[in-house]
Image (tube, rainbow, N blue to C red):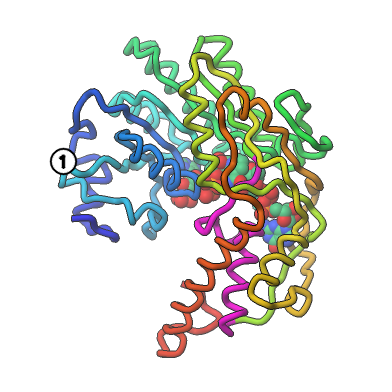
Amino acid sequence: DSTTSRSESDTAAVNGTQNPPRTLQPARKIALITGITGQDGSYLTEFLLNKGYEVHGLIRRSSNFNTQRINHIYIDPHNAHKARMKLHYADLTDASSLRRWLDTIQPDEVYNLAAQSHVAVSFEIPDYTADVVATGALRLLEAVRSHVSASGRSHIKYYQAGSSEMFGSTPPPQSETTPFHPRSPYAVSKCAAHWYTVNYREAYGLFACNGILFNHESPRRGENFVTRKITRAVGRIKIGLQSKLFLGNLQASRDWGFAGDYVEAMWLMLQQEKPDDYVVATEDSHTVEEFLAVAFGYVGLNWRDHVVIDKRYFRPAEVDNLKGDASKAKKVLGWKPRVGFEQLVKMMVDEDIELAKREKVLVDAGYMDAQQQP
Ligand code: NDP
Ligand code: GDR
């Protein structure tokens, strides 16, 4: 029953046409996650399922299945007694779909993780980025507000995935009181989403929290973010599938943590008596070059033999230096990161070496070109 890929009939169930979403004990807490197919969505789903939640995820329509990160926890919804994660089609650009699923699912907690989350890409598609990241958050907040108003379910809690990118060019250390100076359409949109969330809290008394999360990575990180781009290349270079890695600015510093640690902070924010905003960070910062040195050095390679600077990866405006001050989250939430920088890099390289080995088998058998990545 615990399938890893979906069939045509599953798609109908995903679409909500077969099973009513609420099939389990009413006492179970119910979470609704947008962006469930992303890096954080997958870790948060695992975390909440372990806590006994029923988890509903909104996924957007794609011409290919986009559920690779959650396939390992997917159980066919026809098996109603076992399936505690349910997926439904919706989109942050489609307000009616958001309201409809809120009314149907009646969640206790809503996590808004969906976004066009790539900073460099936001310069290419600024209008769409604002529509999803800024107005999308507003649509969801408004759907929650009107759902509460119609149903009286005022205990519902909302989490907004804010970003250290909002601090932009304001120098570190950055805390909840640091002024925002965003440097990209993505970051400006995240600032709008942040203030919409504060406004709905103040205007309507909604239990709404902003998590201001610094960069967090994992073996599930999208392959065009710099950490995963590097560890994928390290794996493939080590196994002999590629020789060069093209990158942009190596001098930017980021406060990189492990995504698995950060989703716990999201949940903790919604378990407090009062809604508030929190910075979540490791308080340790490294340059892209330092990341390269650790990642290549770990497998006995010198990054300078492989990295080529390509101007196309420089951004019209850069964020040079991010390093968080997470003392409030530590004090109030009792949260702290478990995985440090070197451990994180090695975890990602280890996984990507294994992935490259599997690719090599396909290449050697003639099923895949070395240049091609499945
Ligand atoms: P990902 O890019 O991995 O995931 C983004 C998710 O949003 C995916 O599930 C994606 O769906 C979904 N999505 C995109 N557009 C839409 C849309 N129009 N409607 C509905 N869903 C949509 O991001 P992360 O998991 O890394 O990040 C989660 C959130 O946290 C994002 O909002 C991000 O901006 C924010 N954030 C992330 C940080 C990080 O370091 N990872 C740090 C600070 C904030 P699909 O799979 O179909 O593409
Ligand atoms: P960021 O992450 O912009 O911090 O946003 P990213 O990994 O894309 O960039 C980090 C830094 O690396 C530099 N860089 C490159 N970046 C990419 N993607 N590709 C390259 O080839 C490359 N070469 C150098 C960048 O210029 C930058 O300085 C991430 C996202 O997850 C956001 O959604 C989130 O809000 C923030 O983290 C916190």
Instruction: Answer few, some or many: residues within 10 Å of disc 1's Cα (few below 14, many 20 plus, some between 14 and 19).
Output: few
Q: For residue 226: magenta?
A: yes
Q: Quadrant of residue 309?
A: bottom right
> Picture coordinates of residue 15 (x, y %)?
27, 44
The answer to which of 249 and 304 lies nearer the viewer is 304
- The vertical placement of 351 against 336, above or below, is below
Q: Name which residue lies at 43% across and 47% down.
A: 42
Q: Nearer the viewer, residue 285 or 8?
A: 285
* Res 30 → quadrant: top left
| Residue at 44% in and 41% down | 44
Q: Which image quadrant for residue 152?
A: top left
In the rendering, at what x and y percent does residue 73 appear? 32, 51
What residue is at 31 percent from the left and 27 percent from the top?
29
- Against 178, residue 73 (above or below) is below
158 displayed left or right of 147 = right
Q: Compared with residue 12, is residue 133 higher up or lower down, i.e. above or below?
A: above
Is 47 displayed left or right of 237 in the figure? left
**Which residue has dot 1 on it?**
81
- Residue 119: tell me if it is visible: no
- Residue 181 inside the magenta-drawn segment: no
Q: Residue at 20% across / 41% down in the picture?
A: 17
Dot 1 falls on a residue whose secondary structure is: loop
Amino acid at pointer 1: His
Residue 1 position within the rendered picture, expressed as x and y whole percent measured from the top left: 18, 55
* Residue 72 image position (x, y, % from top left): 33, 56
The CB of the residue at mark 1 lies under 8 Å from ligand 1: no
Stretch in magenta:
214-241
Judged left or right of residue 231, residue 320 is right
Relative to the observer, which residue lies in front, 46 or 339? 339
